[in-house]
Image: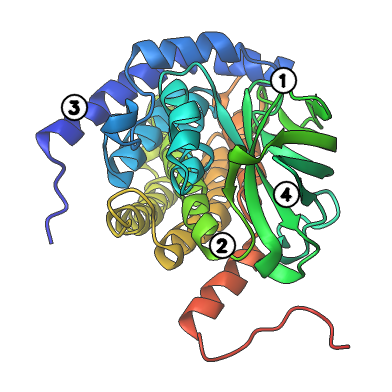
């Protein structure tokens, strides 16, 4: 098996690293103020050529693979040490626009995908609900078809990019059909009547970008905005796997960023008359950190390389990569923080911000317990792992 990147992929990685470095010095301010200039960031990432990486060329996309997307996003995350610069990549390539591609309607694709790819519209995914979190089988948001319209009612929370994006791929329950069989998806424009966007709570990490709320009160959208109706949950989740790949790219890039900060610090810091890196406890810690990073990298590459048509990562490998990264990254950032000594909790040092981002990443895109449920169900398809109460 060849693990070497092609010349085009190496060039993409270099461009992504250079792009990320443009934003690194501003990461501290965005974190402290919990605010970032999304439009400015979006425009710059478009100028640098990072819109629509995996979108088909017939819709104006670049036609690259999920592996290319992983290479670009992980490099931007590592270099920038912040979440913000990759959000334009996510909104023009991630599960929102990818979900629209799963529609059977060419009219719907032509209506939105080219504009998304050009960066004129961003498409976020509105799935999580306040009362159910990652429990997708019990979504309460309802969709009712009335004539040539779909009427939506419900509440969505933790929608990354809420307020800043123009479009939302909303998961809803059709016709009161219980369980996953009743779930479908609809494209909702953020300024539609009956739609309210709120910035949402402040997080301990991943600060600067809204993780907001989308409230739907008799929101009416054209029937032609239907992506998929009930009975298509598994197909819709294929696009959602792109979010898990994005989360895995984040944990990979930030693990590398933590390693960079720790190794650079211990090389310039002296104790007892010599560089701290020369102490066995230090270089053993760095060696262990890099071993875990390499294991995570291979899980991420495998998940991306097995993507269907090069675009949609398969469920089992991408869930494994996301679970491994989300649960191991905080351990790595703690080790990096410890190597900084007292400066590890000094707000002037990036490692404390990277560590807070790592904590927030544990549950982003699916809590570990839910991911383990998914992995187990795919490993043992003949066993029913029932979560609901009997009766």
- Determine which residue is flagged by label 4: 128
Residue 374 appears at what percent x and percent y?
57, 71
Calculate the distance from the C-alpha at mark 3 to the C-alpha at mark 1.
33 Å
Residue 314 appears at what percent x and percent y?
39, 62
3 or 1: tag closer to the N-terminus: 3
Q: Nearer the viewer, residue 263 or 87?
A: 87
4 or 3: tag closer to the N-terminus: 3
2 or 3: tag closer to the N-terminus: 3
Left or right relative to 390: residue 206: left
Give the label, 4 or 3, closer to the camera. 4
Task: Name above or below for residue 324 compared with residue 39.
Answer: below
Calculate the distance from the C-alpha at mark 4 to the C-alpha at mark 2.
18 Å
Left or right relative to 10: residue 323: right
Circle 2 residues within 10 Å: few <14, some 14–19, many ≥20? some
Quarter location, residue 307:
bottom left
Residue 333 appears at what percent x and percent y?
55, 43
Circle 3 residues within 10 Å: few <14, some 14–19, many ≥20? few
- Determine which residue is flagged by label 1: 34
Q: Nearer the viewer, residue 391 or 290?
A: 391
Report the residue that reaches farthest toward the front: 147
| Secondary structure beneath label 3 | helix
The quadrant of the rendering that contains the C terminus is bottom right
Give the label, 2 or 1, closer to the camera. 2
Q: From this viewpoint, is residue 271 visible?
A: no
- The mark found on residue 11 in the picture is 3
4 or 2: tag closer to the N-terminus: 4
2 or 1: tag closer to the N-terminus: 1
């Amino acid at each position: 098996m060849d693990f070497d990147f092609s010349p085009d992929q190496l060039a993409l990685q270099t461009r992504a690293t250079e792009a990320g470095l443009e934003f690194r010095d501003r990461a501290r301010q965005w974190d402290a103020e919990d605010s970032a200039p999304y439009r400015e960031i979006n425009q710059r990432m478009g100028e640098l050529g990072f819109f629509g990486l995996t979108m088909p060329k017939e819709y104006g996309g670049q036609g690259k693979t999920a592996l290319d997307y992983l290479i670009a996003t992980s490099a931007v995350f590592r270099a920038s040490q912040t979440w913000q610069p990759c959000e334009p990549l996510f909104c023009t390539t991630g599960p929102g626009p990818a979900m629209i591609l799963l529609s059977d309607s060419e009219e719907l694709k032509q209506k939105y995908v080219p504009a998304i790819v050009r960066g004129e519209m961003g498409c976020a995914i509105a799935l999580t609900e306040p009362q159910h979190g990652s429990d997708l089988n019990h979504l309460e948001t309802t969709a009712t078809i009335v004539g040539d319209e779909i009427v939506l009612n419900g509440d969505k929370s933790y929608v990354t990019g809420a307020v800043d994006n123009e479009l939302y791929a909303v998961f809803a329950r059709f016709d009161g059909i219980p369980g996953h069989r009743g779930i479908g998806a609809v494209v909702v424009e953020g300024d539609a009547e009956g739609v309210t966007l709120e910035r949402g709570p402040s997080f301990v990490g991943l600060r600067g970008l809204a993780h907001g709320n989308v409230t739907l009160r008799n929101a009416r959208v054209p029937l032609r905005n239907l992506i998929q109706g009930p009975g298509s949950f598994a197909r819709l989740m294929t696009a959602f796997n792109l979010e898990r790949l994005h989360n895995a790219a984040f944990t990979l890039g930030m693990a590398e960023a933590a390693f960079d900060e720790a190794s650079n610090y211990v090389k310039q810091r002296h104790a007892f008359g010599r560089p701290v890196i020369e102490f066995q406890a230090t270089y053993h810690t760095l060696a262990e950190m890099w071993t875990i990073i390499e294991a995570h990298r291979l899980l991420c590459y495998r998940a991306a390389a097995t993507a269907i048509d090069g675009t949609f990562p398969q469920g089992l490998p991408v869930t494994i990569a996301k679970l491994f990264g989300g649960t191991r990254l905080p351990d790595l950032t703690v080790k990096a923080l410890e190597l900084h000594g007292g400066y590890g909790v000094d707000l002037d040092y990036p490692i404390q911000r990277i560590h807070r981002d790592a904590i927030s990443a544990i549950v982003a895109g699916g809590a570990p317990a839910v991911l383990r449920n998914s992995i187990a169900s795919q490993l043992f398809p003949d066993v029913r792992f029932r979560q609901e109460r009997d009766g």
